[in-house]
Image (cartoon, grey):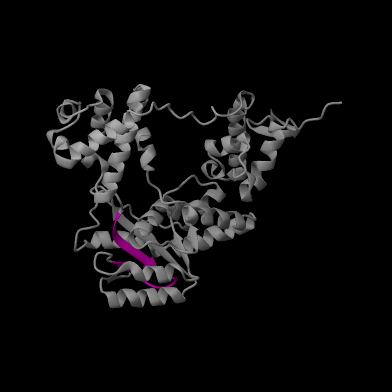
Amino acid sequence: MNHRWVDTQTDFDALIDHLCTESRYALDTEFHRERTYFPKLALMQFATEGGQASLVDPLAVDLSSLRRLFASDAVAVLHAAQQDLDVLTHSCGAVPARLYDTQLASGFLGYSTPSLVSLLMAELKVFAAKGDRLTDWLRRPLSDEQLLYAAADVDHLLALQDLLDAQIAELGRSQWVAEACEELRQRPVSGTDPSQAWLRIKDVRMLKPRARGVARAVSEWRERRAMSVDVPVRQILPDLAVLGIAQRQPKNTHDLVQSRGVEERHSKGNLGKEILDAVADGQRSDIELPAPDGEELDRVLRPAVALVSAWMADLARKQRVDTSLLATRADLVALLRGDADARLLSGWRSELVGDDIQRLVQGKAGLTFDGRGGLRLIDVAGPE
């Protein structure tokens, strides 16, 4: 495998100039977030058709040039792009204006979120060695094994795109893939809404309403502080301490350090004051748990969630579409609830299932077994 190492601004800017002239380029990133709140970009890999892979050291160059590339007409081809888009947003404040995700595209051919290794083997009969999941991409210099593995992530992406595209076009699903890739590109950066961070804590549902209010306030404070100093939330305050504080609801630093999971350092200076302020804020309201998906539906529609979910899973299998791409439970609930912006009401999803689901709910269609272990949609005659 041929690749070159790019760690000077001159070489990086020249690479960006070249990529801007291409119709497409392969892209991948390596990053860590074990010691930070936001992902830390450690390596970028680029490849063009017929060219060698370029491995860029983001620790040595100014990444602002990426905005020029991402604003160009060149299509960025990635595999499982969501996390790459997240880290690029945090690193340079931009994502590609045109995007193609090979993992997402493969979902329209019957694959279920395949790894790049498995997809390359299945489609191109190319064996790409798996890398060390725990390798340190921030160390310098990188080993030869790390460099080879990093280059392999982009070496075959463009050939893979060509092969997937041909099959997708034959099925008449090119527009479906384009819509799905654009939806992914515009998806908000993943992360936690600070006000909802408390819901990720194990056993928080066991708390009483007032204690939940404290847990929510303390969790929100913890999340915002972790963001501000860019460290994992556990380094600010462990989950056990959040639960202990919520149950004890301390009024002073002495009470605070008596809470389970709280260490002496948590009560010192501004840190202790901020925690106690969060406790006082949380005590002002009782918090009810959010209703599970479907509970907010009219009671007569709740049975439809399970029934339609089973039909959609069966239809997705027959149509060779990854069920997770077609719809989540929340998508189905949104449609049944009548939300105007429900994803099943527009685009390729509406074309495939949206209209039929509405016919089912309206009593204009029904489901029956097809005699082969599957389900079949049938028209239902109206009242005489």
Within the magenta stretch, is there residue 46?
A: yes
What residue is rendered at 61% in x and 46% in y?
Answer: 349
Quarter of image, res 247 = top left
Can residue 204 be seen here? The reply is no
Residue 140 coordinates in the image, percent (x, y): 19, 62
Residue 352 coordinates in the image, percent (x, y): 65, 45
241 shown above or below 48: above
Considering the whole magenta stretch, tell me its main secondary structure. Answer: strand
Q: Quadrant of the C terminus?
A: top right
Front residue (pair 304, 48) = 304
Front residue (pair 162, 32) = 32
What residue is rendered at 40% in x and 77% in y?
Answer: 18
**300 left or right of 252 in image:** right
271 shown above or below 50: above
Q: Quadrant of the N terminus?
A: bottom left
Residue 17 coordinates in the image, percent (x, y): 39, 77
Can residue 280 be seen here? The reply is yes
Quarter of image, res 165 = bottom right
9 shown above or below 326: below
**297 left or right of 275 in image:** right
Total marks in image = 0
Residue 144 coordinates in the image, percent (x, y): 23, 63
As drawn, the residue found furthest toward the right would be 384
Q: Which residues are magenta?
A: 40-56
